[in-house]
Amino acid sequence: MEETLLDIDLKDREEYIINMGPQHPSTHGVLRFETCLQGEMVKYIIPHCGYIHRGIEKMSESLSYPQLVHLTDRMDYLSAHMNNEAVALCVEKAMEVEVTDRVKYIRTILAELSRIASHQLWWSAFGMDLGALTTFFYGLRDRERILDIFEETTGTRLIQTFITPGGLMNDVHPNFQKRVREFVTYFRKKLPEYNQLLTGNVIFQERTKGIGYMSKEVAISYGVTGPSGRGSGFHCDIRKLAPYSAYPFVKFNEITATEGDTFARYWVRMQEMSESLDIIDQLVDNIPQGDYMLALKAIKAPKGEFYHSVETARGELGVFIVSDGGPNPARIKYRTPNFSNLFVINKIAAGHKIADLVAISGSLDLVIPDIDR
Amino acid sequence: MALLTTFREVGTYFREIYSGVASLVRGMRVTGGYFVRPQTVTQRYPENRKELKMFDNFKGELILVHDEQNHHKCNVCNTCMRKCPNGSIEVISKKIEGADGRSKKVLDKYIYHLDMCTFCGICVSVCDEHALKFDQEFEHAVFDRSKLVKQLNLPGSISQKEANNE
């Protein structure tokens, strides 16, 4: 029988339990790590989730497909566009319709912009978790420009509800292309600054290299996807494996690293930012003309089961819809990346010092509402 | 031999110190650059309220568009109420006697629950009459929750259709 935390006589083994969270700055949300320590060493961690469970999947059963899109923003709020896109693509797959090329291009540009914005915020907060406050200001300074682009087109900054089954809520703003182009040139200049500030820093390297090693086997068996999985050499980029939207039209590399430590996961995200810039660069000048929304009579999935997955900033987000032919889904299930990414933490952080736990959980880039949803 | 190894170890030790310090200096050069040439990106919010302008598409709060004659475009089709995911819109209609003697359904109260709204924008996009719009207001903080329940049709306003019939 497996030993549970309660069975252990803690006094004899000089171990004690400390709760990291639910209100801890480095968990970026309400997540509790029940951490068993021996001195400063982490023996094992039991993550407790559910503090921000809202029952999104159950709520979605009583909403029609266009209505339930707005709930997906509230899962992984930093990749809201990709979450919307996942539902939209799954419903479109079920209805067997294809959106116009214009919609595909705009969806991809928005998704890549939010990937950059998400990685910028992660970079800012990751630096801050490790004690480098400067990164927070630099990252947010540049992220603000992306949020401005979003705000001008969609009307909101963080949770946009812009991509909907059949197309987009409205057409992009006339300034959109100009602003995106401006941002790409601006951020190409600023990205080396990020590396000068943090990547090369000796203190940062000492704190991340060789810390939190995750082998490829562990990544696959726990289902760790996204940059965290790719840091261990796991080829899991859905954009490459099953290209959707405008990804078949662009050339880009899947960034992988083989080291599998915290620094490798960091490095993958930094490279992904410039890769995303390249994708945007290829698309922004060639947005074709066309309608932004298909003229659909009713948005209803036929009877059956449908699955579609997209690559969000944190990994594979899968949407599984069971439909009975009505306007609402009979059951909807989200395979969220963070839920799988979270539970590997015991495996990779055990045996390290408690200060490294902050670095390791930071490198997994967890967004808590996505875990609990 | 042992001496040589010691020398090598000492050399590596100093080289590491040197490269470590150099990496710190490289980072300091970035921050130092901004120290000498500051770029202000922050805004002084409460002070700049007069100049602060939101984008045209900004989703502030829902309004029913009224023209100069105090006419709105709502003809009580209830689509927005049905499509709203969280029931934050209540359209209350009343029956009035039209010019031709037949009773007509017109808007009595358009109630908007700002406290329940998630700003998804479905109401605006489904309205065929373009009667709804989001305005630029973003300062929603109030002391009492009941103040967030708003009546959107202005007092004394009638719909454009109603005005044309008379």
Image (cartoon, coloured by chain):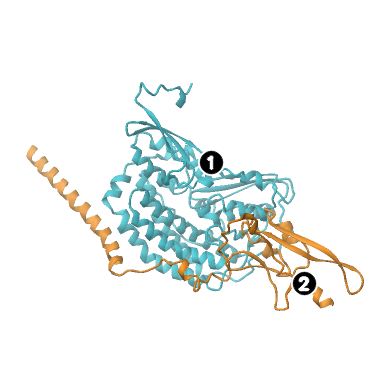
User: In the drawing, what numbered circle is on residue A261?
Assistant: none
Above-or-below relation of B22 to A130: below
The colour applied to the residues of chain A in this rendering is cyan
Image check: A161 left or right of A121? right
Disc 1 element: loop
Which chain is depicted orange?
A: B
Q: How many marks?
A: 2
A52 relative position to B153: left or right? left
The subunit letter for the residue under badge 1 reads A
**Quadrant of residue A101 in the image?**
bottom right
Q: Which kind of residue does numbered mark 2 sit on?
A: Ile
- Tell which of A30 and A235 is nearer to you: A30
Residue that carries the numbered disc 2 in the rendered image: B158
Question: Could you say whether the residue bearing mark 2 is in a helix, strand or loop?
Answer: strand
Report whether residue A49 is seen: yes
Q: Which residue is mark 1?
A: A51
Q: Which circle, 1 or 2, is nearer the viewer?
A: 2
Disc 2: host chain: B
Marks 1/2 in contact by CB < 8 Å: the verdict is no
Q: Residue at x 55, y 57 (%)?
A: A159
Label 1 and label 2 in one chain: no
